[in-house]
Image (spheres, rainbow, N blue to C red):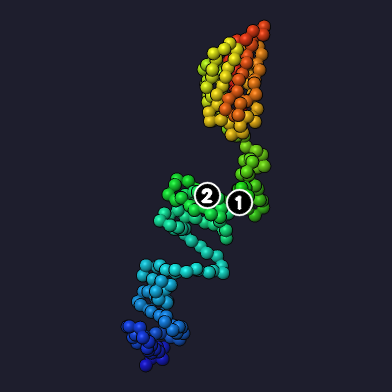
Amino acid sequence: LDSRWMALATLNTDAGSTLKWLPGAVALPLPDNGQQIQWGSNAQQLGRGARQIILDGAAGNAAIPGVLTLNNDLNISNFVANEGATAYGRIRSVDQYHAMILRGDINYTAPNYTVTGGQNCTAFVQFGGTWRFRHVNATSNILLFEITPDNILYKNVAVQRIPYVSCRVDGANVNNRGGQVVPTADTSQAGRTILTISPPHPAGGLFNPQVTLITNWGYVYVDSPVNGGGLTVWTANSSLGLAHLSFFLLIF
């Protein structure tokens, strides 16, 4: 025989035991009792049954039913995670309190939540409720954007929120000026405008309405908000006569 080749014959109880010709100096592991190692032209099988590992050289795939442990970097060009019947792609840390779901949302509190996949959203899960976005290079580390449970900040300055109500009131006519909610107006009594806000303000009645008269000299008085669902604005002319005067209303 050519000295570069060696003959190895294996004999066990598995069907298909054959003579294998292998080039060079090759060290081959022997299977444990009840296990199997199998070689093919493009595929290798380690173990048997549900726990077997298959390396498919033809398709470039590796099937590992257990846990893959690495002691260095893992580079993945495409990431897909499957849990249940829906593929949604979840990346998480060692617990359920910190995660990112690429196409889905969670439906309960941690650690007992499950993921509802297939939704057009990307969900971020964070125990403390703070997310930070940084610009980092060789000479700087700048906190550009931060979301906390109480605020949204750009370079440590709170971002102005969209007003809950921002409108112009002309009698019973209410015109939106960029607010999230447009109230309705009841002007059945002279000088009194009852504004109904629906849905109610998230802070309940603990908001500060800002009212500014338009083009008229006069007086304005605001009753205390009622459970976030509305407020009453009284207006009077410069002679203290009750009358409907136009005004701007702003509520954050």
Note whether 51 is above or below 193 in the view shown.
below
Q: Where in the figure is residue 155, as x and y percent of width and height? A: 65, 42
Q: Where in the figure is residue 120, as x and y percent of width and height? A: 45, 45
| Outermost residue to the front | 227
Q: Where in the figure is residue 230, as x and y percent of width and height? A: 58, 25
Query: As shown in the figure, which amino acid type bears the numbered disc 2?
Result: Tyr
Report the front residue among 140 and 68. Answer: 68
Q: Where in the figure is residue 157, as x and y percent of width and height? A: 66, 39
Quadrant placement of the C terminus:
top right
Q: Is mark 1 on a helix, strand or loop?
A: loop
* Residue found at x 65% / y 54%: 138
- Residue beneath disc 1: 127
Q: Residue 108 carries which label?
A: 2
The number of discs equals 2
Question: First in sequence: mark 1 or mark 2?
Answer: 2
Of tags 1 and 2, the one toward the viewer is 2
Apparent side of residue 31 relative to residue 138 in the rendered image (left or right): left
Query: As shown in the figure, which amino acid type bears the numbered disc 1?
Result: Phe
- The answer for how far apart the CA atoms under marks 1 and 2 are is 13 Å
* Residue found at x 60% / y 17%: 247
Task: Determine crowd level at label 2: few under 14, some 14-19, many 20+ residues with C-alpha closer than 10 A.
Answer: few
Can residue 153 be seen here? The reply is: no
